């Protein structure tokens, strides 16, 4: 079992990769969360108007995904973790996960600095080791979208040094998430709606 568990319509619109049996774990042990995620990806379209919206704060693109999942009971989640050494608490900082539900975490990286991938993957690794996260999901843009941004006159707002697929995969393949199962989703031109 693997990527074929994802509906064909979703696989046709996104580039999807699986590490450490993430799809099988989601479909088997977290079927409701898997359904939520597939429904979110099916409903999403990359709107021209959202690409053209000026920057500053969280873009309409991740906000749309966050809003869809939030409507299904997912929430932004921080973890308060510390270990004790000789009865002294030592805090273990973790980063807030964009969307979390029942041991599944989803991060949406649209146009951030590539260090955000390091943060997300390390966070997934740590939370997996602490047995509070079973699967990490990263949704990001495919590198191919740079041509679209250039066509729309927004190429300078996006760049090679920001979060996109070709920056993510070397970090994943280099083991940045440790043994945390990962579902990686890239949105590209197949998601684009030029009329919206």
Image (tube, helix red, strand yellow):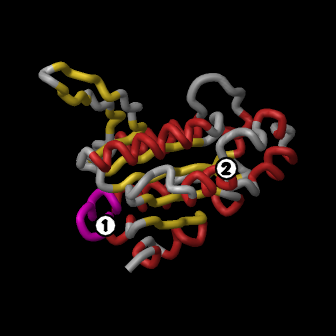
Is residue 170 rendered to the left or right of residue 89? right
Q: Residue at x 67, y 58 (%)?
A: 188
Disc 2 is placed on an element classified as helix
The image quadrant of residue 165 is bottom right
x%, y% of residue 50?
66, 39
Mark 1 or mark 2: whose residue is earlier in sequence: 1
Report the quarter where the N terminus lies. bottom left
24 or 187, nearer to the observer: 24
* Crowd around label 2: few <14 · some 14–19 · many ≥20 (10 Å): some
Residue occupying the point 35% across, 43% down: 126
Q: Position of residue 44 (x, y in %)?
A: 53, 53
Q: Is residue 75 above or below residue 193?
A: above
Name the residue beneath numbered marker 1: 25
Q: Is residue 29 magenta?
A: yes
| Secondary element at image label 1 | helix
The stretch in magenta equals 25-34
The structure residue drawn at horizontal position 76% and vertical position 38%, both measured from the top left corner, is 158
Q: Residue at x 25, y 44 (%)?
A: 130
Q: Quadrant of residue 36?
A: bottom left
Q: Nearer the viewer, residue 176 or 132?
A: 176
Q: Is residue 10 rendered to the left or right of residue 38? A: right
């Amino acid at each position: 079992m693997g990527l074929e568990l994802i509906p064909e319509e979703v696989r046709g619109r996104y580039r999807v990769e699986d590490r450490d049996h993430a799809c099988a774990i989601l479909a088997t042990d977290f079927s409701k969360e898997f359904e939520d995620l597939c429904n979110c990806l099916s409903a999403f379209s990359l709107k021209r108007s959202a690409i053209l919206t000026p920057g500053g704060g969280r873009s309409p693109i991740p906000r749309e995904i966050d809003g869809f999942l939030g409507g299904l009971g997912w929430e932004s989640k921080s973890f308060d973790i510390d270990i004790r050494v000789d009865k002294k608490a030592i805090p273990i900082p973790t980063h807030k996960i964009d969307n979390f539900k029942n041991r599944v975490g989803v991060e949406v990286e649209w146009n951030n600095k590539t260090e955000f991938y390091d943060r997300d993957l390390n966070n997934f690794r740590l939370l997996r080791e602490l047995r509070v996260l079973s699967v990490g999901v990263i949704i990001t843009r495919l590198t191919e979208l740079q041509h679209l941004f250039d066509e729309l006159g927004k190429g300078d707002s996006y760049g090679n040094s920001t979060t996109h697929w070709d920056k993510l995969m070397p970090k994943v393949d280099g083991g940045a998430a440790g043994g945390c199962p990962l579902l990686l989703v890239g949105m590209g031109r197949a998601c684009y709606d030029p009329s919206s």
